[in-house]
Image (tube, grey):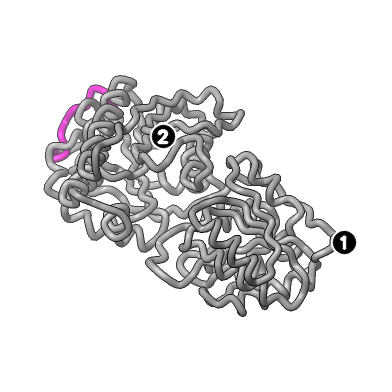
Amino acid sequence: MNRVAYVCADPGIPVFGTKGASVHVQELVRAWHARGAEVEVFAVRRGEEVPADLADLPVHVVEVTNGSGPAAREVAQREAAAELARLVTAWGPDVVHERYSLFSTVLPQVRAAHPVTAVLEVNAPLIDEQRDHRVLVDEAGAGQALAAQLAAADVVACVSEPVADWVRGRLDAAEDRRAGMPCHGGSPADHRVTAEVHGGAEHAAPAVVVTPNGVNTDRIRPVSPETGTLGGPVVVFVGTLKPWHGVEDLVRAAALAQVPWRLRLVGDGPQRAGLEELAGDLGVDLELVGALAPEQVPAALEGALVAVAPYPDFGDHYFSPLKVYEYGAAALPVVASRLGQIPEVVRDGVTGLLVPPSDPAALAAAVDRLAADPATARTMGAAARALMEQHHSWGRVLEATLAPVPAPVA
């Protein structure tokens, strides 16, 4: 059995939280368990929403101390990551699977101590995000940390092709760091460095693979739409109430509906008050459920006929929309914006309907079409469920991640 250290040094992501990133962490741990691996998690936040099947999961937490400003915070992140590296090294895993976070250099630090298979999972261009939308004081330091991580990795698993392009653009900076890295030898006794010939070949640059999100089709089961209720069928949205989810457009679409349907929002966030005010102004009756733990989401989808992902047309569409996979697993047809990776997951006219982004009228028309024809909606939902079962399990995500590793793991 392989010993796998899953590392998450991002202070914005609790292991047991309500965010999609928390779901991602938990599901990859389950996927490793399914391969027979012994897994321990090393993170900077634990969270409180512990699912029953992961109650015994060992989670080692090194908290990031609150600094007096952004610069101090960045130093604290770097220090916390170094302590995580020390703990991982002491445990002695065969595999280190790390979710990329700013300023972490866990992979090279662990690899300097003993050979491991090193997987770096990149879900967003964090340096760009931090610089453009928040505060990044030490951008050069963040770049150097990423270069060190890439140099130490055997595989870099990117959530989308745009993210993979971003990583490839930074691999040149990692080249100079590769010399001197302990080689992946598959043997604890092998301490040769990567600059030396190893097994007839020098240590290569990491394989960059694209591994979009997946879904747990055991956790999320097909739902049954409510029928014969006043106000029409339920149309559901799940996600944080932030501008980049486009929920404003959804509320405006509800106001433009030509057939009756009811809008259920599952989530919370800084836009909540504004959305409630907008709905009041437009005469839209919202069912606001609030943020839920991942284990509670399936129940919140129950009774719905249609699910919506109304992403607006702004920013770079490098994300992999976790909610779309979960909607499909629930056998819900998805009405979604035609952008980014979405057309690869929502097959227009088969598993849902695609609409132009930032177009409430088109969104309303698409939802109206399914609300007025429940039989077609259910047929599309069944096709979505089948697609998720056949192609988008988390086991397949992990399998694709590990495909370039020469020696099978777990």
Q: Nearer the viewer, residue 71 or 193?
A: 71
Q: Which residues are magenta?
A: 187-196
For image coordinates 36% across by 39% down, the residue present is: 11
On the image, the x and y values in percent for residue 371 come to 75, 69
Per the image, is 59 magenta? Answer: no
The three-letter amino acid code for the residue at tag 2 is Val
Mark seen at residue 228? 1
Q: Nearer the viewer, residue 31 or 268?
A: 268
Residue 98's quadrant in the figure?
Answer: top left
Residue 119's quadrant in the figure?
Answer: top left
Identity of the residue furthest to the top in this view: 90
For image coordinates 31% across by 50% down, the residue present is: 207
Nearer-N-terminus badge (1/2): 1
Provide the major secondary structure of the magenta segment.
loop
Image side of residue 340 versus residue 189, left or right: right
Q: Which residue is mark 2?
A: 409
Label 1 crowding class (10 Å Cα cut-off): few <14, some 14-19, many 20+?
Answer: few
In the image, which is nearer the foreground, mark 1 or mark 2?
1
